[in-house]
Image: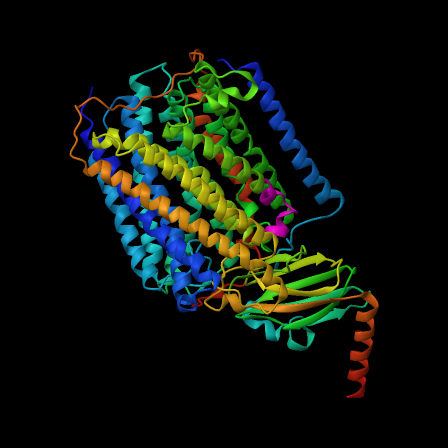
Amino acid sequence: MHIDPLEKQWVQIALGICAFFIGIIMLDALFHNINAPSNVETIDSARLHLSEEFAEQNLGVQVDGEGQVVVRMIAGRYSFLPKEISVPAETKMTFRWVSSDVLHGVHIPMTNMSTMVVPGYVAQVETSFPKPGEYPALCNEYCGLGHDHMWSKINVLEKDEWQQLQLSMNGADNDE
Amino acid sequence: MMNDSVERKLALSHMSVAFAAFIVACILGEYQVLERSGIFPALESPAVYFASVSTHGVLMAYVLTTFFIMGFGYYTASSTLKIPVWNPLLAWAGFWIALTGVVLAAIPLLSGLASVLYTFYPPVQADPMFYIGATLLVVGSWVWCGIMLVMFYQWKKDNPGQNVPLAMFATTANALLWLWTSAGVALEVVFLLIPWSLGWIDTIDPGLARTLFAWTLHPIVYFWLIPAYIAFYVFVPKQAGSFLFSEEAARAAFLVLVVFSLPIGFHHLYMDPEQASGWKLLHGIGTFIVTLPTFVTGFTVIASLEIGGRLRGGQGLFGWIGSLPWTNSMVLAVILSLLMLIFGGFGGIVNASYAMNAMVHNTAWVPGHFHLIFAGTTIIMYFAIAYYLWPVLTKKPLYSNNWALVQLWTWFIGICILTTPWHVLGLLGQPRRISSVAYNNLLTLSWQPYELAMIFGGLIMLGSAVLFIYILAKTWMSDVSETENDYVLEYAEPLHPVKNLPEYLNDFSLWNKTIAVLMAISFGIPILQFFFMDTFDSSAWGY
């Protein structure tokens, strides 16, 4: 068997390139905890309205007891509910997406908020948005003939602006 | 020389189906970029658009490829081994089973009853005839796999101690790859989709279905690509007036491709919630390993070309490139194919990168990438193979070499104009698989110029595709008939004669066992988990 010395060198270089890429990915995954949405959590997509977590009044942006921002969204043909939400910039938050019908996917352009929304499973993504602005959340998996029309609006506000909005909304709740 | 009329007829029949599917799908493709741009309101119709996308995908990915690979494989087997195709009657049965499958699937596809796209992700449900047709196509291809394996092992038995010719070694590797690859989607279709679409079972687990589909979804692209690599190794060096730089490296490249393309399908599921990150990382590592045979192929093929260029008088570091026979369609095709492979490979590494994938997943970047690698790198070699085989199969001279060169150049230019803006659209956040841009957001204004460029690129490709069919048809219908033995396939000779080839580079049994172990490791628990978790199935949905 004959393998040219130059070819052997090239194989070593190619192995080095692969090892370099794999190394960076493993470093980020294992030490910086940068992972794809992979929480393997099941839910009955036909009974979301009966689940406490995804009942209508719990959808959208909430701040839990520890001050962590949690966003709960339902993907259903042809909209993400709620249709419009406001979140703070430069704040770590957790998105929890579920489908009420078929397969969907969602991404927010120019950010790394991206996940498939598979019926029967909860898709959880942790992220933060560095730049304030008005972003669309777009359905990116074919879900039916109205697929093009499936999107929602995400307003990313400066931190203090968002806090004021939260306060005024809570105030409005108290007035009722 | 043996009478190969049976083999020639088999190859011509399979390839005719392949290229008929191809030209129909090209027309649909151009319609889709026009419809999507929104500049022709009369064309706007999601129902027609998604029926078209589904048909385009099925024709290109399943019909063109499978029939081309079968036809090319039959002729390669008989011409390299110098034996007739084993059991031609069975081969014809495979052809008709597969063709029946295509017709059965085409009826619901074209009538809008199977607009579930070629990935048919449940719980959106298509007409049962669509799933049954797709299954028959695969069953027909399994007949081909069986015949390739029988011919490989019969030849080995009759020629003990001899090396199986490289072209046949690679073709059999591809048959083996396809048997392993198609098992995943076969399990999905036979146990989930068909019983569910016929109403025998009420519900389906989309997570399990996606996992089984991911089993098939990566290695299938290597099933399509291997004929292009076969041409790289066994035709290109000779056409460039050169020798194959290393046959041993070629065999190793094919084996690593087959073994490592299988256990890595979860890079399609990076963004999916039903699989855990550990499995995704494992598949991600395998995805980088499978780039190795492509690195090796790039080196070996370019080295073979360089020897050819220098033998033809090329001097200096790059001078040999200019002295290559650029007017040889096979040589021109490989140069363009490798150029597209460099850019497509870069995009592929972005997709494979576990975390970075989040920025491009399911955006327009993805179809941009696979059109560059599939329609570009792979199909341009299918063209070159067709130009090379057609005179051999029809026993008539090629209608026009110059028009063939024009066709290859225009295809390359069309691909560049189509896929570059497509990638950019993805980076600008455009989702894939939309029939119009209906989002009320400023971002979408930046998409328009790129969509217009895509129409233009697609138009050039459609013109090129028509020219391709025209050249083949004119050749076939020509009155000029050459004497019997004017055209034979010339296979490249290795630069260094292959001596003392180890058995593991001349046989598959070790690799078959390796694949079985790797598949059990990478897919065992991820599939079994669905039977141990409390999962909630979905009922059927229309679209």
Q: Is residue B133 left or right of residue B37?
A: left
Q: Residue at x 48, y 35 (%)?
A: B516
Q: Residue at x 31, y 56 (%)?
A: B106
Q: Is residue A123 left or right of residue B466?
A: right
Residue B472, quarter of picture? top left
Q: Residue at x 49, y 47 (%)?
A: B417
Is residue B4 visible to the viewer in this orientation of the structure?
yes
Q: Say which of B326 and B106 sits in front.
A: B326
Q: Is residue B81 magenta?
A: no
- What are the residue bounds of the magenta stretch? B349-360
Q: How many marks?
A: 0
Q: Position of residue B263 (x, y in %)?
A: 52, 39
Main SS, magenta region, reads helix
Q: Position of residue B152 (x, y in %)?
A: 33, 26
Q: Residue at x 46, y 23 (%)?
A: B250
In the image, residue A73 sits, relative to residue B178, either above or below, namely: below
In the image, residue B110 sits, relative to residue B503, either above or below, namely: below
In the image, residue B110 sits, relative to residue B351, either above or below, namely: below
